[in-house]
Amino acid sequence: MKNLTSDLPALRAVKLLDQLRERIRYLHYSIRTEEAYVYWVRAFIRYHGRRHPGEMGGTEVELFLSWLAGERRVSASTHKQALSALLFFFNKVLGKDLPWMKEIGRPLVKRRLPVVLSPDEVAKIFCLMEGEHRLFAQLLYGTGLRINEGLQLRVKDIDFGRATIIVREGKGGKDRAVMLPQRLIPALHEQLARARVLWSGDQDAGRGGVEMPDALERKYPRAGSSWNWFWVFPQATHSTDPRSGIVRRHHIYDQTFQRAFKRAIEQTGIAKMATPHSLRHSFATAVLQSGYDIRTVQELLGHSDVSTTMIYTHVLKVGGGGVRSPMDVLPMVTA
């Protein structure tokens, strides 16, 4: 059996879940991935009566996954996430490379049409949102950013001169450039002015500093306190970093924005299961409808494979750009 951790540093933590966290952080996985993997590994251990995972293998993993699918009735994507967490744990923490790891089948994730909002619906939602939440929603719709990409924008990432926003470390760790909507420039200047007040207050109080990506905090220890690295959408209060325990300024919370968006949807009476991610879907559909080619939309969205972007062409075929219903060509019958 090959040890898959031979090229990784020895783990210092004693407890299994702490070892999992240590390995995830060493490999620069996100905090969300860390939380999800720890959740599933803990659930796996509890399901098997707290047996040590080193004593278990493919049979126990398949039993757990069958329980998730049969008893818990989790979605295919959730099932896949649980499997990924367990494979990471057995590979990167326990150092096991066993045949059953390759034999376990991956659940088939069904491709579904995204929820797309019409321009009129988007406008109604914006009218019912306020302040930075409205601006943030407008930015997501105007650029096609993922919600986390928008939240993690830094002051330096907005280039007003070139009307460009640089997305750093997007999905897959890739950078890309998107357009800066001209209509949002005045509001973004106002947002940055409000953010600078918070930044200045932190500096005066000696509490300057925001989270820096990967090892940049060690390489440039003062950069985290600079204006260039400050959040475009900072949180009004300080919070404790769950990994380091440091109290500092974080960007606005995604849950807070999601609640504001949900309230606006409910107030409009729109009968769609829309989420903030629907703004990204709506952006892609609108850009395609404007005549831009699929490769351009792929680059703007940061998709690795154009087949992912192609889903929006199906949305257009269903709508006004698609086949005309035979019902619409029937002669009208009057009573």
Image (cartoon, rainbow, N blue to C red):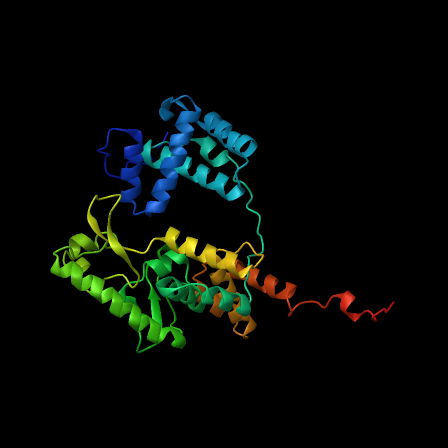
Residue, far right: 335
Residue 9, horizontal then vertical, whole percent: 23, 38
**Between 50 and 25, which is closer to the camera in this rendering?**
50
Which residue is found at the position 41% from the left and 35% from the top? 40
Residue, far front: 267
Please indicate, yes or no, whether residue 226 appears anywhere in the rendered image: no
Left or right? Give the position of 203 relative to 279.
Answer: left
Left or right? Give the position of 142 relative to 204.
Answer: right
Residue 48, horizontal then vertical, whole percent: 43, 23
Which residue is found at the position 14% from the left and 58% from the top? 222
User: Where is residue 43, by image quadrant?
Assistant: top left
Left or right? Give the position of 290 relative to 22.
Answer: right
User: Where is residue 227, by image quadrant?
Assistant: bottom left
Please indicate, yes or no, whether residue 143 appears anywhere in the rendered image: yes
Which residue is found at the position 56% from the left and 62% from the top? 312
Residue 281, horizontal then vertical, whole percent: 51, 61
Instruction: State which quarter of the image contains the C terminus.
Output: bottom right
- Say if 279 sits above or below 248 in the image: below
Which residue is found at the position 51% from the left and 66% from the top? 124
